Amino acid sequence: MERVNDVMSRYREPVVHAMREALERPGVEHVRYMRYHLGFEDAEGRAIDAQGGKLLRPMFCLLCCQAAGGDAGRALPGAVAVELLHNFSLIHDDIEDGSAERHGRATLWTLIGVPQAINAGDGLFVLAQRTLLDMAKRGVPPARVLEAAALLDDACVLLCEGQYADLHFESRSRVSLDEYEAMIAGKTAALLAASAGIGAIAAGADGGTTHALVECGRMLGMAFQIQDDVLGIWGEAAETGKSASDDIRSRKKSFPVVYAFDHLSGGDLDELERIYAATAIGDRDAERVMELLQSVHARAASTEAAERWAARALEAIAGARLGDQRRDIEALAAFFVHRRA
């Protein structure tokens, strides 16, 4: 954690400052909604001394830029673009999932209504594209800026495809592990892969190094999401900001649940299918799901799966020519798997 904290402290301030700058749009009134969602303002428009969340994606972008031999400042607009794009997706996710809170605050749509929240999300999407182009002002050649923009757009297509699958899963009582992995490859892993690639591109890395870092980011994204699924069921509310078993009550097809569907049999499997086919899951059924997950050791299996993806991520960069920041990437891989929030 000492090394992870060092990475976070190294990059957080410039990322937060650049994000605030990106949202300085005089005359564009609805930017205030974006600032609220990002935690920079309260519901009345008063400034908050907030740090913008974990910021793992932009920090990973800057880290990969340095690891590939570049100046992290050249990648800063791309790093901010990734975070703005991520938050565009969160605003829309909250609407589509009917979520009333995010990190202990009212979600944007509950305050201003669905139409204006959609508009604010769309605004973040466009600002992300516009902000990335500012890499040219920091010395990144235009052809490489175009390459980074294409990478970000491709990631957004995959992100939307992952969200499509996630929403589609809601109408099904069960999904396979292969379907689950395809979903998170888009919804979570694609944007972390783009973060790594944009950093490498800004550094002027060769194709092999860029590909290695992109693959590393993609696999770390898989590990990150599986651990997120673990926290959604067994996490401590004081650390995660939401109640334990929330993901069960919302019938989310997370890794532990999908794993249980794959490994239960007979009456236990029938019972899990019955519970997940219901329109709502009450306290008693939620407790029963927890028992069924425990019976097939779903938590341990989830952690093992996350560890495998993290190990593959490090294998992807084993042959790449990277600087001392390789050890920072290794520390982040361990953090992604074993974090508690």
Image (cartoon, helix red, strand yellow):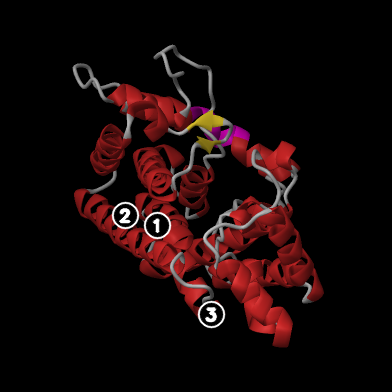
Sequence-wise, which precedes: disc 1 or disc 2? 2
| Residue 87: image location, x then y, percent | 40, 41
Looking at marks 3 and 2 on the same chain, the residue that comes earlier in the sequence is marked by 2
Residue at 50 percent across and 16 percent down: it is: 48
Q: Secondary structure at mark 2?
A: helix
Which residue sits at x=27%, y=32%? 116
Q: Is residue 162 above or below residue 130?
A: below
Give the quarter of the figure containing the N terminus: top right
User: Who is closer to the viewer here, 118 or 24?
Assistant: 118
Q: Residue 152's mark?
A: 2
Nearest to viewer (mark 3 / mark 1): 3
The answer to whether residue 60 is magenta is no
Q: Which residues are magenta?
A: 9-14
Residue neighbourhood size for the residue with mark 1, other residues' Cα within 10 Å, grouped as few (<14), some (14–19), many (≥20): many
Tags 3 and 1 in contact by the CB under 8 Å rule? no
In the rendering, at what x and y percent does residue 118 appear?
28, 40
Residue drawn 80% across the image and 74% down it: 295
- Please provide percent x and percent y for residue 137: 25, 35
Mark 3 or mark 1, earlier in chain:
3
The secondary structure type at the circle numbered 3 is: loop
Instruction: Tell me the kind of residue under disc 1.
Output: Ala
- The secondary structure that dominates the magenta segment is helix
Kindly indicate the quadrant of the structure image that contains residue 193. Answer: bottom left
Q: Position of residue 248 (x, y in %)?
A: 63, 58
Q: To which residue does mark 3 refer?
A: 176
**The disc labelled 2 sits on which kind of residue?**
Leu
Label 1 with label 2: CB-CB less than 8 Å = yes
Instruction: Decide: few, some or many residues near mark 3? Use Cα within 10 Å; few <14, some 14-19, many ≥20.
Output: some
Amino acid under label 3? Ser
What's the CA distance linking mark 3 and mark 1? Answer: 26 Å
Residue that numbered label 1 is attached to: 194
Q: CA distance from mark 1 to mark 2?
A: 6 Å
